[in-house]
Amino acid sequence: MQLKSVDVSKTASATTIIFEALKQAIVEGELEDGTPLRQDEIAKMFNTSRIPVREAILKLEEHGLVTSRRYKGAVVSSLSHDELREIFDFRVLLEPHVIAKAVPQMTPEILHTARGYCEALAISNDSAEWGDLNRKFHATHYAASGLTYHLAAIDGALDRIDRYLRARIMLDDGMIRANNDHLLIQVSCEEGDVERAAELTLNHIEQARDNLMAYLK
């Protein structure tokens, strides 16, 4: 199992640390679909008892990242084509609305930060780094909306599909197309064009969905 070992014996938040470590490994694709999460092994890696490990796995299950199977224990969840499409369709409904609310509230500082992520994305050729920058780029824009419930829902949806997107984005010219979209979205935000930003965001998500669905088939 590819996880960074951390000694959490001296911390009061072992469950949180284990949860975040496992979540990151799942989202980034280091723990693949169906990988068993063995409590004893994880507890040893983090120098702790099985209790915080069990609690972390239960929390991951609540987030839809882990599934408990009879006789097999907890394993990394997998998504069917229909489930992936449903999550993308949910994003299509939600994210254009969020960025439309966000654009009028974007400060020069927010736009400067997002522009930095946009430029970093354009030169990145590592899927893990690119995936992290991609999340930060969109999150920076969306945060200006102040729609905290919407933002949490988007974050949860991305946690479920990120590992699939990262696997796909390195093939063909997917990264180039996505970076072109990012630049157009960034410019529309800088110009304060609400409708254009929402339209570009919708098209960006739909294209990612269609490309992933075609790849998986």
Image (cartoon, rainbow, N blue to C red):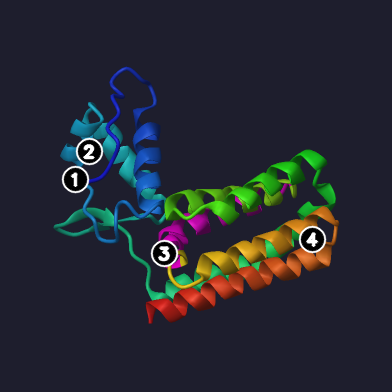
Q: Which residue is mark 3?
A: 164
2 and 4 marks in contact (CB < 8 Å): no
- Indicate the position of residue 51 as horizontal and vertical percent values: 26, 33
Mark toward the viewer: 2 or 3: 3
What's the magenta region?
146-168
Question: Marks 4 and 1, Cα distance to the nearest angstrom?
Answer: 47 Å
Mark toward the viewer: 4 or 3: 4
Tell me: 15 left or right of 39: right
Q: How many marks?
A: 4
User: Is residue 153 visible in this depiction of the protein?
Assistant: no
Label 3: state its secondary structure: helix
2 and 3 marks in contact (CB < 8 Å): no
Q: Amino acid at mark 1?
A: Arg
Q: Who comes first in sequence, dot 4 or dot 1?
A: 1
| Residue nearest the viewer, comparing 173 with 193 | 173
Mark toward the viewer: 1 or 3: 3
Question: Marks 4 and 3, Cα distance to the nearest angstrom?
Answer: 28 Å
The residue under the point 77% across, 58% down is 187
Label 1: state its secondary structure: loop
| Residue nearest the viewer, comparing 70 with 217 | 217
User: Is residue 34 visible in this depiction of the protein?
Assistant: yes
Question: Marks 2 and 1, Cα distance to the nearest angstrom?
Answer: 6 Å
Q: Who comes first in sequence, dot 2 or dot 3?
A: 2
Rendered-image quadrant of the C terminus = bottom left
- Indicate the position of residue 30 as horizontal and vertical percent values: 32, 51
Q: Which residue is mark 1?
A: 38
